Amino acid sequence: MAAPLTGPSQSMRRLRALLPQVLDSVDCLLFDCDGVIWRGDEAIPGAPQVINLLKERGKRVFFVTNNSSKTRKMYADKLQALGFNAKEDEVFGTAYCSAMYLKTVCGLQGGKVYLVGSNAMSQELEAVGIQQTGVGPDHIHGKQGDWAAVELDPDVKAVLVGFDDHFSYMKLNRAFQYLTQRDCLFVGTNRDTRLPLEAGKAVPGTGCLLQAVETAAQRQAQTVGKPNHFMFDCVASQFGVDPSRCLMVGDRLDTDIMLGSNCGLKTLLTLTGVNTVADAEVHQKSGSAERQGMVPDYYVESIADLLPALQG
Amino acid sequence: MAAPLTGPSQSMRRLRALLPQVLDSVDCLLFDCDGVIWRGDEAIPGAPQVINLLKERGKRVFFVTNNSSKTRKMYADKLQALGFNAKEDEVFGTAYCSAMYLKTVCGLQGGKVYLVGSNAMSQELEAVGIQQTGVGPDHIHGKQGDWAAVELDPDVKAVLVGFDDHFSYMKLNRAFQYLTQRDCLFVGTNRDTRLPLEAGKAVPGTGCLLQAVETAAQRQAQTVGKPNHFMFDCVASQFGVDPSRCLMVGDRLDTDIMLGSNCGLKTLLTLTGVNTVADAEVHQKSGSAERQGMVPDYYVESIADLLPALQG
């Protein structure tokens, strides 16, 4: 077990001994999903019990994920199947949050989106009244000289890039033509470079696809997911939570912990996913003020470490 | 017409008045292709006459392109069809040069390459004795949990990324798995972000695909194309040219002009493609020593501007 850490501006502490006070100090816990409560299709051992006991103790629990491949309903179904006591309105994924962002921040209601993304994303868009085009395969066809003249939908006002296992050169080209031939909003769900699976494996994440489109368009997308505070704003505006009494729990420093820091939440790193304590120490010792936002207040080996205090 | 420019470290001059002296001072001219001698499938007006007259005057002419979608033979055929007097061994494209790079610099002879690229690239690889796998469509299949276990060829020792109109999420994933599951070389043909077509249009370039793979692998590829001096080394080693008596002619500052600067060649920007004189002035005035390498010695509106001097 790693020893407690102290740094120039902030100390990062193993949570176990402090757990009763920390739990008393919060009313609300936000959990990232991949690498925190599950890996791929398997729950982290002990995670369902932790979530369910927190709720029994009267804590509010939310699931805040950059993964855009599922609707809120699909996440609720997966959570329940893995033994988590969870409801649809407790889930804030980037499929849902991107739709909310386009509707509320961009004012796109009624407009149409060129979507590099999943069926889940199109369902969440349509649920808030935004039409989309683009989901599904789009293979190369025709001669190179005709690709710049590929058919574009005249109603499209925004390009939205999320996780898309049908990503292709033609989709990249179509997004590029929308972004350069007309005045189009450009939104991405998130910048995660890898999607962690079971047993330390991973596949390329949405950040890779977004980077390809940005490189072509020579334009940066506005991203909705963590560490952008919009994900927390969605939770706060719907449930009236007090940031100072919230704990953000995640496995990534640049998304989960940074979101917590950006929004004034307490932060807890769990070591069952992407980052290590050593990664956090590098940020801590960097002397960069911005990178201090990636240093968590606390860390645990696994969220199962919360179990003894909750069962006691 | 723009006026002559002077800068702190270098002056950039319109060529017309100086043309006889400049042509006398070189034995060899290297021409980029897209945006310089043609756009898409149409020759720049006057370009074939310029090339053919240069040769009649005893100059050596080479075609040096970052475009990886054709073999040397295919380029020679296209050049001849458009009226250029050109031979296969005068063409140095990144399909050919990448194969040479893997064979001579990386010593991969006999090894196998996972190729994100074209049939032309596979032909150039096979011509130097390197086997490849990967060309053609590779659509998504199976469940997400299985993608990290996608079948990998045990003989693959390098990942090569070039222009690939069949680029797909599965190809990105396969490249990522090769690069992270084993000790693999990582080579890219070039970083051009866009491929210019006729009438100011463009489609996404290889740089976008390479960026996606690099973002996933969190590793930088070695790129073979301009501005890397390897392209010029290929010409120089095969034809024994003297760099100080060469003129590099191109439309891009970051590839063509930079290559010339990197190799000690004279440089000429032509304004029929990507960059403008204003772009060059920004580099000139930046005060950055590295960016002075993107300031050409001379510029012309079009290489057709060379015609009067050659016809006179």
Image (cartoon, coloured by chain):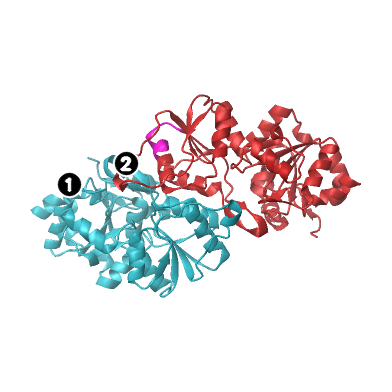
Chain colours: A cyan, B red
Residue B38 percent coordinates (x, y): 70, 49
Residue under pointer 1: A45
Task: Name the residue located 42 percent from the left edge and 75 percent from the top edge.
Answer: A110
Q: Please identify the quadrant where the N terminus of chain A is shown.
A: top left
Q: Amino acid at mark 2?
A: Lys
Q: Of tags 1 and 2, which is closer to the observer?
A: 2
Residue A19 location, quadrant:
bottom left
Chain part drawn in magenta? B177-184
Tell me the element at label 1. Answer: loop
Residue A146 percent coordinates (x, y): 59, 56
The local crowd at label 1, few if under 14, some if 14 to 19, many if 20 or more residues have their Cα within 10 Å, is: few
Distance of label 1 from label 2 (alpha carbons): 18 Å
Between A197 and A283, the residue placed more toward the observer is A197
Between A6 and A253, the residue placed more toward the observer is A253
SS majority, magenta: helix
User: With respect to residue A136, does B288 lie above or below?
Assistant: above
| Tally of numbered tags | 2
Residue under pointer 2: A201
User: With respect to residue B35, does B259 lie above or below?
Assistant: above
